[in-house]
Image: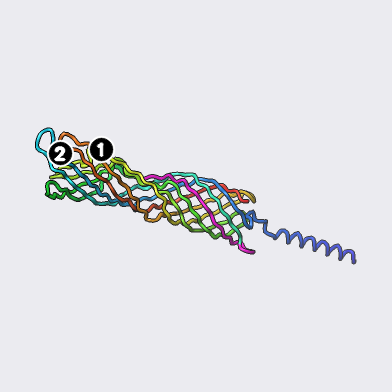
Amino acid sequence: MNKLLVYTGVLILGLTGAFANAQKPPASLVPQSAFFIGIGGSANSTNFDNQSTWGKGTSYSPPYTPPVGSTKASITGSAEGGTDVHLPSQNNFSPSIHAGFFKHFSASKWLWGTKFSYNNLQATSTVNNQLIPQSGGYTQGGIYTPFNGNYLVRSYQQSIEQQFSLMPFIGHSFEKSYIYAGAGPTYSQIKTSLNSLTGFANFVGIPTAVTGLGNTSSYAVKQWVWGGAAMIGGTYFLDKNWFVDLNYTISKTSNHTTNWGGPWSFGGDAIDGPRTGTNQGTSSGSIVNQSLTLSLNMAF
């Protein structure tokens, strides 16, 4: 009888232990803490709606005697004005790289971390035959004459070429994954291009290329600007060292201003003599980019 009780007790203890082990949740593949690096690709939608430009042109024509006719007095003129620029949105794919760190809070499924990302966006939006309205006047022989005109830009372009972001995040882990959300600053390279710019003035209703017909100027300016971004995402661990990450990020640059311009000159023709002058202007606006990024990452 005593032996039976012992054997029964051992059996019960064994079954209890097996049942307890069966009730234990499987070990999580998500490390308690890890650094990670990854590479992937992004599907991007970039909005350039909030753009405007302003320009001012000056000109000087020295006294000139045409082949036929009397000498013309020198001419000094200027005109300026601005307009909104309506650039279409752009969709493209781009490579991206990531690095970061995460760590669980003590005895918790909640975690915190930070992610550093680089996205080689190379998104450019173009509008052709952009007009920049202007008004001004010229002085010749002591007489001032007002006029209206336009800068004609054959190709106006705004680009966001590359973007860095640093985003702290908070998340919650599960058996093989974690979800997260975060926000932080961005640093983006912006490029503004005005290609084949010509200054026109309307004298008595007749458009005249003040800077010279076919004598165009082009300007391209790059600059780095700060901005901000927010993201949400999730991971899935293939094993302890490898996981895939899918996240959605929306970013916006600060309202940057680009200065462009430079001198121009025209050799003249049979009617009008040589002319010189300057173009100067600004372009401003912000850029919004939305990215859906899929990456493969290694945790260590």
Which of 261/24 is in front? 261
Residue 142 visible here: yes
> Which residue does the numbered mark 1 point to in the structure image?
215
Residue at the (73%, 61%) spot, across then down: 20
Which circle, 1 or 2, is nearer the viewer?
A: 2
Q: Locate residue 181, reporting x and y percent.
A: 51, 58
Q: Earlier in the sequence, mark 1 or mark 2?
A: 2
Q: Quadrant of residue 3?
A: bottom right
Label 1 and label 2: CA atoms lie apart by: 20 Å
Q: Quadrant of residue 34?
A: bottom right
Residue at the (9%, 36%) spot, across then down: 69
Please state if 48 lies on the left or on the right of 272 as rendered.
right
Q: Locate residue 272, reporting x and y percent.
A: 16, 38
Quadrant containing the N terminus is bottom right
Amino acid type assigned to the residue bearing label 2 in the image? Tyr
Is 109 in the magenta? yes
Crowdedness of circle 2 by 10 Å Cα count: few (<14), some, many (20+)?
A: some
Residue 126 visible here: no
Please state if 246 lies on the left or on the right of 259 as rendered.
right
Please state if 13 lies on the left or on the right of 86 as rendered.
right
Amino acid type assigned to the residue bearing label 1 in the image? Asn
What residue span does the magenta drawing correspond to?
105-126
Coloured how? rainbow
Q: Determine the secondary structure under disc 1.
A: loop
The single residue placed furthest to the left in the displayed view is: 69
Q: Measured along the vertical axis of the image, is residue 109 above or below residue 218?
A: below
Please state if 281 lies on the left or on the right of 239 as rendered.
left
Q: Determine the secondary structure under disc 2.
A: loop
> Which residue does the numbered mark 2 point to in the structure image?
64
